[in-house]
Image (spheres, rainbow, N blue to C red):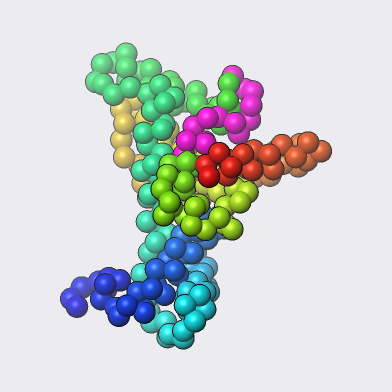
Amino acid sequence: SQGRPKAKDYDDVTQEVLAVAIAVYRCLICTDTPFPDHAKELEFAKIRWKIGCKKLDIRLEMTPELVKMITSRGSHVRGELKTKVRPIIEHYGFESGQHKRTIKRNRELAEELKEGYNFVYSTDRKGLFRNKNIQKVVNAMWFANKQDDGVSYPEYFKPMPDITVALVLTAMECGIDEWGTGIKTDIAFTAVDYRTVFDAHLKCLRNFQEATKKHELLDKICTKLYNVGR
């Protein structure tokens, strides 16, 4: 076929292995390494290909084209998450409109939500990591349909890994950033711009876990995110 290869360009068996490899690769992006470097992408792709072959009890060589088809799903899944986040972010109270007052209100709201990670609290600086929009994103991304990754591959999401929660918070912050000027603008959810944001959220989650380990608060939050989503 001409141009970039697609799954349908391969025979049925290869397509089946590819489908499994891609699905599991997506899970790894969401639960292990959301912003992998090139070496990590290759490592993940090769391991996932072997898993696909093992699951279908066959041996197939992995070609560079197949590697690309698997690793391209990293940006796909992050883009998908961002798309799911967008309408949920509006629940914080952002409004479309060109009126100066609306623009000013949106800009101030974006600043307020990002200040001290206010957007992750359920109420005014209480209920850390319990904002209802976090659950909404989890539900929309991984549990909306029977075919979604959280339903199909529960072993990766039960309980919800802190890495996944950090990725959700990073995508939510990206969604808030889109309102930063007061008028909604598209901001790409890229590793270049958001890997450090992700690292900061993950560090915050792990600090919280350490500070509250006696009560296992983060474990309870992560378990609830999975159970309610499921």
Q: Is residue 39 left or right of residue 71?
A: right
Taking the spot 47% from the left edge, 77% from the top edge, the residue there is: 56
Image quarter where the N terminus lies is bottom left
Taking the spot 41% from the left edge, 54% from the top edge, the residue there is: 147
Q: From the top left corner, tell me how far across and down residue 3 is, in percent.
A: 20, 73
In this orientation, which residue lies closer to the viewer: 187 or 226? 226
> Which residue sits furthest right?
214
> Which residue sits furthest top?
101
Q: From the top left corner, tell me how far across and down residue 25 is, in percent.
A: 47, 64
Q: Is residue 71 magenta?
A: no
Asked if residue 209 is positioned above or below residue 195 in the image, the reply reads above
> Which residue sits furthest front?
146
Q: Is residue 79 visible?
A: yes
Q: From the top left corner, tell me how far across and down residue 31 is, in percent.
A: 55, 55
Q: Which residues are magenta?
A: 124-137
Q: Is residue 189 visible?
A: no
Asked if residue 56 is positioned above or below residue 198 in the image, the reply reads below
Taking the spot 30% from the left edge, 71% from the top edge, the residue there is: 7
Q: Is residue 127 magenta?
A: yes
Q: From the top left corner, tell me how far across and down residue 196 is, in percent.
A: 53, 48
In this orientation, which residue lies closer to the viewer: 97 or 47? 47
